[in-house]
DNA sequence: AAGACAAGACAGATCGTTCTTGTTTTTTTG
DNA sequence: CAAAAAAACAAGAACGATCTGTCTTGTCTT
């Protein structure tokens, strides 16, 4: 019952998740089903048959669109990453104010994300945690995703004339990862605010050019 | 070759890992082999047969000591947690100085941990990331482990007369988790120092009773 | 005599993958 | 616009491999 085929739903509450999107064709049906199962029950633990049952598609259709399970995993990670970044940076673009306030807004967005009942942690953190050694493709996908965030953070650090732009971005990224993991483990969205307070203190002490 | 049976090694370089200990009997052989494979290649991805091959033991021996794979996972997590905490808190007990310095020493220990070539992240973070939904036993084991750290942090916060003891401990824990994940993903131990600098700033601004 | 262990056959289920057959949908073309 | 060609898709059988777990037989150590 829990993993039954998704019923029609015109209201998109989880803009950050590809798995919550309305699939338009068989390929998307497979990807949204796979995304949900991978992220909630793990990649290795999710078999092809479970994905097909949830997607309501045929086995040949999956292997027509994806050469292997590994390729499906890669496609899901890429789609999840892109959807999440569109949501995240899209919302950040709405924030008015100087760079420090934009950085702090990051943690408000994290709290929104954590508060979603469907929150399952960061797919990339989870994937690297599951595969660790081997599967360099997964690590690379996670790296690409993280670079997007670091690039944005560096831009903010430059705008606020931080002395060490890279180190400032790294520091915020540590708070970012820490908040995600703590919120996932404790099922407690308020870790985003804890991280925000730390960030406020850090940014107020930044050395400036 | 990579996962061959471990050769004799009298020097214990990785005191933090149960998988690096010298097994004394068949049960410990199984547990150290399982620990190594679980932590490096994932729990679901590691089959019983691979564990037995690495341990050099028989299948009946495994099922004589453990009722199921799930129970073996639980036993490995518990052993890994205890070994790690013995190393961590044992080393912390050597640190002289007031509470803030003891807290900062946490991040020096993290850097040591991250610098070990065999570092694979935190087994509990990895386990929760892999299973997420379902498997409440794993989540509970992770919670117990985290409570040990939080209790220690609260004691330090009390000693330095922090106004909000719980929040102070939570903040350091966020930096703790963030450093682990960042170091694991970037294969870069220096994230421990990044987290330490943030902690220094945070502790210097703490509200005191 | 008893328990710990090795070695491995065996079972039933599930894994990822390929293949076949037929239907529906889309695209191209006359 | 209609006919024809092509692609997408459903349903599911079949494959060999691997999965967790059981069971048997025999050796070794206490």
Image (cartoon, coloured by chain):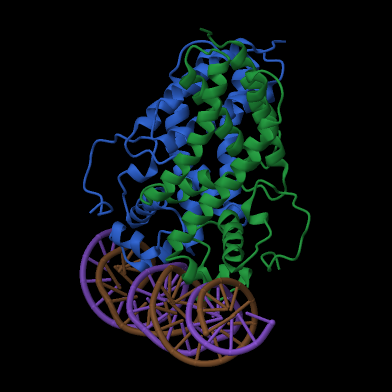
Chain colours: A green, B blue, C brown, D purple
List x then y, in percent, for residue B36.
Answer: 36, 49
Count all numbered tags in the image, as a single digit.
0
Q: Is residue C23 above or below residue A127?
A: below
Q: Is residue B145 above or below residue B27?
A: above
List x then y, in percent, for residue B20.
Answer: 33, 42
Which quadrant, please, contains the C terminus of chain B? Answer: top right
List x then y, in percent, for residue B143.
Answer: 60, 42
Q: Is residue A151 above or below residue B43?
A: above
Q: Residue at x 47, y 28 (%)?
A: B89
Residue B122: tell me if it is visible: no
List x then y, in percent, for residue B71.
Answer: 50, 58
Q: Is residue A72 above or below residue A85?
A: below
Q: Residue at x 43, y 33 (%)?
A: B183
Which quadrant of the view contains residue C3?
bottom left
Q: Nearer the viewer, residue A72 or A190?
A: A72
Which quadrant of the view contains residue B135?
bottom right
Q: Nearer the viewer, residue A161 or A133?
A: A161
Which quadrant, please, contains the N terminus of chain B? Answer: bottom left
Residue B172: tell me if it is visible: yes
Q: Residue at x 29, y 36 (%)?
A: B12
Residue reaching furthest top? A209
Q: Nearer the viewer, residue B93 or B194?
A: B194
Q: Residue at x 35, y 65 (%)?
A: B49
């Amino acid at each position: 019952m829990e993993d039954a085929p998704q019923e029609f739903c015109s209201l998109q509450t989880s803009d950050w998740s590809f798995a919550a999107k309305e699939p338009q064709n068989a390929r998307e049906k497979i990807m949204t089903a796979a995304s949900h199962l991978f992220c909630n029950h793990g990649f290795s633990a999710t078999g092809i048959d479970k994905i097909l049952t949830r997607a309501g598609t045929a086995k040949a259709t999956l292997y027509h669109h994806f050469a292997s399970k590994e390729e499906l995993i890669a496609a899901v990670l890429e789609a999840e990453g892109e959807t999440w970044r569109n949501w995240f940076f899209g919302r950040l673009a709405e924030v008015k104010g100087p760079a420090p306030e934009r950085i702090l807004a990051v943690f408000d967005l994290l709290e929104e994300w954590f508060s979603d009942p469907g929150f399952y942690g960061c797919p990339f953190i989870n994937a690297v945690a599951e595969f660790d050694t081997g599967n360099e493709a997964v690590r690379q996908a996670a790296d690409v995703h993280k670079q997007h965030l670091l690039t944005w953070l560096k831009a903010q650090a430059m705008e606020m004339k931080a002395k060490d732009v890279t180190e400032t971005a790294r520091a915020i990224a540590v708070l970012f990862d820490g908040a995600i993991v703590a919120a996932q483990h404790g099922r407690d969205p308020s870790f985003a605010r804890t991280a925000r307070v730390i960030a406020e203190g850090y940014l107020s002490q930044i050395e400036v050019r």
